[in-house]
């Protein structure tokens, strides 16, 4: 027994689904004018097709492949009147050689324009961040040179640290002035952290440069604590050792 398929028609009525090629009328050729195409778009479909509802030959479905516009983004006009999705071509007077007009839905167009604007702004912000990154790369070489000098024990003028920090802060101000969203915002955030790390490094190098013996002082402090610790522990036996040492000395003196 052949399986019967059902479909819902406008108004909520269930009817047996029509098979393609059966009771759909003759194939007609219509043309659709659209701003995205210099020439009208030709369509070949059954005359009983709808503008967009059930059948596989619907106008909007075919136009979606040709224009890239989704069916819900399309507005179709025939003889100056916008056609509803469920209306049939032959009922509305559309026949062979008829011409339709396709317009993009205003909300869809506005949404796409907004997406294009955001994309352009993101590209602009990314380019601005890239410009700052190039400057920070140059300054990073300067920070590395100062670090090598300080680690090598070379005394560097404080002006070098002040000037380098000021140049980095200028780049930080540039980053603060860049309005960014999405990926560009993440790039800006990463570069801000990078600049801040270089500034912290300069502060540390400046402090070490001003007090080159600070590390030695720490080492002495640790050694002193260690000696004090052992002295304290040794004090438990100190009288015995002292007495023994004294006795030996005394015996030696008596021997002489």
Image (cartoon, rainbow, N blue to C red):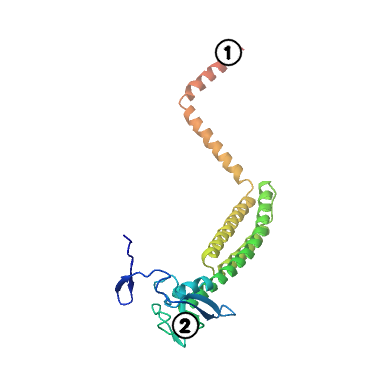
The spot of residue 162 in percent (x, y) is 64, 60
Residue 153 left/right relative to 107: right
**Residue located beneath label 2 in the image:** 95
Picture disc at residue 213: none
Residue 166 in view in this figure: no
| Residue sitting nearer the eye, 185 or 3 | 3
Q: Residue furthest bottom?
A: 80
Say which quarter of the image contains residue 20. Answer: bottom left
| Residue sitting nearer the eye, 162 or 65 | 65
Q: Which element is circle 1 on?
A: helix
Of circles 2 and 1, the one toward us is 2
Picture disc at residue 254: 1
Q: Which element is circle 2 on?
A: loop
Residue 250 left/right relative to 82: right
Query: Is residue 245 placed above or below 39 in the rendered structure?
Result: above
Say which quarter of the image contains residue 191. Answer: bottom right
Q: Quadrant of the N terminus?
A: bottom left
Residue shown at 56% from the left, 61% from the top? 187
Residue shown at 55% from the left, 70% from the top? 119
Q: Quadrant of the C terminus?
A: top right
Q: Residue furthest left?
A: 13
Residue shown at 50% from the left, 30% from the top? 230
């Amino acid at each position: 027994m052949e399986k019967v398929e059902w479909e819902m028609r406008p108004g909520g009525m269930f009817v047996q689904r029509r098979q393609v090629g059966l009771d759909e009328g003759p194939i007609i050729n219509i043309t659709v004018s659209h701003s995205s195409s210099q020439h009208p778009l030709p369509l070949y479909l059954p005359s009983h097709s709808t503008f967009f509802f059930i059948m596989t030959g619907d106008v909007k479905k075919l136009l979606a492949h040709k224009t890239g516009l989704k069916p819900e983004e399309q507005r179709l006009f025939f003889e100056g009147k916008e056609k509803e999705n469920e209306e049939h071509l032959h009922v509305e007077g559309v026949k062979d050689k008829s011409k339709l007009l396709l317009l993009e839905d205003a909300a869809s167009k506005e949404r796409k324009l907004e997406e294009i604007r955001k994309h352009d702004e993101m590209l602009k912000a990314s380019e601005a961040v890239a410009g700052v990154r190039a400057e920070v790369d140059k300054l990073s070489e300067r920070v590395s040179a100062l670090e090598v000098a300080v680690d090598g024990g070379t005394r560097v003028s404080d002006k070098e640290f002040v000037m380098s920090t000021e140049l980095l802060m200028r780049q930080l101000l540039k980053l603060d002035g860049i309005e960014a969203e999405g990926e560009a915002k993440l790039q800006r955030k990463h570069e801000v952290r990078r600049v801040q790390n270089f500034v912290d490094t300069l502060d540390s190098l400046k402090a070490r440069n001003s007090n080159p013996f600070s590390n030695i002082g720490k080492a002495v402090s640790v050694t002193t604590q260690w000696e004090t610790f052992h002295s304290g522990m040794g004090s438990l036996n100190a009288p015995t050792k002292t007495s023994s040492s004294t006795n030996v000395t005394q015996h030696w003196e008596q021997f002489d």
